[in-house]
Image (tube, helix red, strand yellow):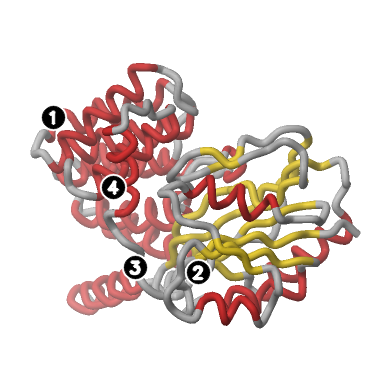
């Protein structure tokens, strides 16, 4: 069985750290905690689980802190978690099984990261992240914000997932502040960081600036395919926010230059036609979304609802608006196969039932 060092960076995480460590402590062989300046009881909580708690001055650089945590690891693999992450019971079992069977030739283990959920707790946003990395193999974190490791060697895609559940919002301005500080210092953002800088500008409702960053990112042609596709979508979002409806579709169609259609993009195109009350065209794109094969291992952001529930529930509405009640009911029931307790599904059933009574 391989050994694993759990490596974490923390700051003022007293409300979530114990939850995280309880979910993982008995699965790992060593716990490394790097505290970047807590003023609450974070360090005391960490000390209940490990004697290896280190102080590291915050440098507005997440990769520097991550690399510091990895530098103290002594086991075969380094595994990272954030304080507001946890391992659910089924994922704990899967991780333990992985430890028992992992080929030591594997350099990086990729695992799903579940970060968005609906009212019933189903995953609505997910993507793969590098989760375990072979210790002392030459891999390092890069990027002051949205830091990442470039995998080398043999890569394994694992079944266990990490669940991200925030207990409180983070500083909403922190990432943008770090990026702008870097730019003031004359630093050039590499493509991945440029992409995320554009997203931060978008989150801050600075849509003209975000659009400029995304357009430059795409024009330079050095981005990863999944970031390129996402950037096209964000260009469309920016145009929409700026009231430039005619520019939205061309921005979305541009995503097809980079790879085959993603259900997420098809649903956005369907939404545009739906908003224009062009329901026949909307149905076409929602139907196309249903043909798209979900492939989480491509590494991009995945919205699971786009691969079933969302196209079906939207096609229900479209066909209802087109006066085709039979098809509308059919697609509502198809949506129910994905989310039986969906409020929209239940509301539609009640609506169709009332219509049936009126015509009986």
Instruction: Give the mark nearer the N terminus: 1 vs 3.
Output: 3
Spatial separation of the CA atoms under disc 2 and disc 4 = 22 Å
For residue 246, the mark is 1
Q: Are marks 2 and 1 in contact (CB under 8 Å)?
A: no
Can the viewer see residue 284 in this picture?
A: no
Instruction: Give the mark nearer the N terminus: 2 vs 4.
Output: 2
Instruction: Give the mark nearer the N terminus: 4 vs 3.
Output: 3
Q: Position of residue 54 (x, y in %)?
A: 61, 64
Residue shown at the point (58%, 45%) measured from the top left = 296
Q: Are marks 4 and 3 in contact (CB under 8 Å)?
A: no
Q: Does 4 sit above or below residue 68? A: below
Which numbered mark, 2 or 4, is in the foreground of this view? 4
Write down the residue under mark 2. 84
Q: Name the one closer to the observer, 249 or 88.
A: 88
Q: Name the one closer to the observer, 329 or 226.
A: 226
Write down the residue under mark 3. 169
Q: Residues within 10 Å of mark 4 (few under 14, many from 20)?
A: few
Q: Name the one closer to the observer, 2 or 292.
A: 2
């Amino acid at each position: 069985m391989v050994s694993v060092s759990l490596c974490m960076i923390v700051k003022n995480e007293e409300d979530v750290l114990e939850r995280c460590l309880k979910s993982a402590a008995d699965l790992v062989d060593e716990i490394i905690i790097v505290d970047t300046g807590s003023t609450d009881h974070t360090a005391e909580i960490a000390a209940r689980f490990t004697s290896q708690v280190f102080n590291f001055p915050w440098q507005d650089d997440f990769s520097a802190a991550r690399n510091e945590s990895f530098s103290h690891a002594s086991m075969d693999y380094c595994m990272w978690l954030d304080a507001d992450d946890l391992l659910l019971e089924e994922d704990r079992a899967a991780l333990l099984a992985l430890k028992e069977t992992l080929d030591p030739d594997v350099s990086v283990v990729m695992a799903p990261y579940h970060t968005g959920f609906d009212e019933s707790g189903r995953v609505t946003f997910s993507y793969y992240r590098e989760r375990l990395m072979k210790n002392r193999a030459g891999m390092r974190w890069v990027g002051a914000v949205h830091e990442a490791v470039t995998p080398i060697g043999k890569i394994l895609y694992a079944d266990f997932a990490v669940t991200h559940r925030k207990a409180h919002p983070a500083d909403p301005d922190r990432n943008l502040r770090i990026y702008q500080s870097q730019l003031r210092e004359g630093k050039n953002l590499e493509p991945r960081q440029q992409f995320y800088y554009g997203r931060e500008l978008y989150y801050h409702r600075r849509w003209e600036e975000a659009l400029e960053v995304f357009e430059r990112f795409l024009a330079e042609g050095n981005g990863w395919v999944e970031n390129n596709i996402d950037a096209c979508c964000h260009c469309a979002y920016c145009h929409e926010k700026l009231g430039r409806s005619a520019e939205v579709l061309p921005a979305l169609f541009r995503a097809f230059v980079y790879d085959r259609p993603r259900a997420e993009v098809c649903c956005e195109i369907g939404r545009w036609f739906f908003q224009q009350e062009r329901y026949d065209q909307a149905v076409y794109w929602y139907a196309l979304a249903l043909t798209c094969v979900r492939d989480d291992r491509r590494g991009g952001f995945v919205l699971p609802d786009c691969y079933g529930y969302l196209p079906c529930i939207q096609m229900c509405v479209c066909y209802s608006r087109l006066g085709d009640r039979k098809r509308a009911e059919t697609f509502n029931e198809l949506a129910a196969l994905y989310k039986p307790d969906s409020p929209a599904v239940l509301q539609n059933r009640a609506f169709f039932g009332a219509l049936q009574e009126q015509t009986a």
